[in-house]
Image: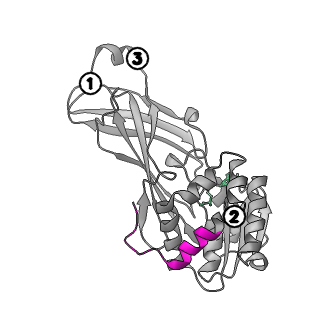
Amino acid sequence: MTRDRPISPLAKQLVADIQRGGFNDTLALWGCLPGQCLLDLPRTYDLLSIIEATTEKGGTAVDLGAGTGVLGFGYLAFGGGFVYMVEQNEAMVGLLKQKAEELGFADRVEIIEDDVRTIELPGPVDYVLAELVSTGLLREPLISAAQNIRAEAKDALYLPTDAYLGAELLNRSGMPLTEVQRYAHVHIPTEDALHVDSIVRFFLPLGGTPEFLRLHTSLGHPDGTISGLYETLCSPLELVLSWKDKAQLQFDPLHAGQDIPVHLAYPFGGDSQDVVAEIIDT
Ligand SMILES: C[S@@+](CC[C@H](N)C(=O)[O-])C[C@H]1O[C@@H](n2cnc3c(N)ncnc32)[C@H](O)[C@@H]1O
């Protein structure tokens, strides 16, 4: 979902400047998710346009999982005063230092090589930039990172502010059998739970045999917009369903009009194999 807003010249310039110099060599070192994220331009320009619309002049931000630094550098380019960039990958930290110099931001950035889940921020922040997001809030530690820095970000804006998690059931060929059902709304600044554990009920309008669960995620932002479905952010994720009664799967397709209760449980930041997605009773 891209925005209607035109891409600002500042945003275009920033993305081009980050790509200049040793960028490609550094990113090639480790196959590089942050590099792919930067080059997912609909994602990158949408996030920059939100930051441009919401940055207060002279404020302080933290960029959690800074990667190429595009969000934190964007904050500075749009009038922010100072940014802490936290990144655990050594190669990315080297790139961030080089880019901070090249972009003329070196005296407005503190680059911290550390784990976002345990770091103690040096001071309070007005804005939390945290594109530590994978579909279903799996794989990346957004929630534990937000919980960890919460005390230093009492009245801060958060990007993203909300995550809306939904799922649908698919048959063996990957055809949807149900509508997408929301199973969680996570308000990032205040979320206390570190896991999902719920019974999600799906209505099967035409019958069939569900074999997969497809997770969907969309994000709410501090400018009031909602987005999702980028190549590197919030793309759908398919998981194999298990059944409490396996025999039923082979011999007895479910009937039109049935309700299918699925037990869906996993830790935020966990991996796909940590997910319990089990049809519990039909
Ligand atoms: C999806 S990338 C996003 C990069 C950048 N913020 C952007 O939007 O383009 C996530 C980044 O977070 C970093 N990261 C993941 N887990 C981390 C952790 N526990 N502590 C610090 N950095 C982490 C990864 O190394 C990666 O650079």
Residue 75 higher or lower than 34, as above or below: below
Q: Where does residue 251 sit, x and y in percent of width and height?
A: 30, 13
Is 42 magenta? The answer is no
Q: Which residue is most to the bottom?
A: 57
| Closest to the observer, 206 or 38 | 38
Q: Identity of the amino acid at label 2?
A: Ile
- Asked if residue 122 lies left or right of residue 271, the reply is right
Q: Which residue does the numbered mark 3 point to in the structure image?
A: 246
Instruction: Report if residue 191 is visible in the image.
Output: no
Do the CB atoms of the residues marked 2 and 3 lie less than 8 Å apart?
A: no
Look at the numbered disc 1 and give the secondary structure of its residue.
loop
Range covered by the magenta-colored residues: 1-17
- Asked if residue 230 lies left or right of residue 81, the reply is left
Tag shown at residue 149: 2
Q: Quadrant of the N terminus?
A: bottom left
Look at the numbered disc 2 and give the secondary structure of its residue.
helix
Q: Identity of the amino acid at label 3?
A: Lys
| Closest to the observer, 186 or 72 | 72
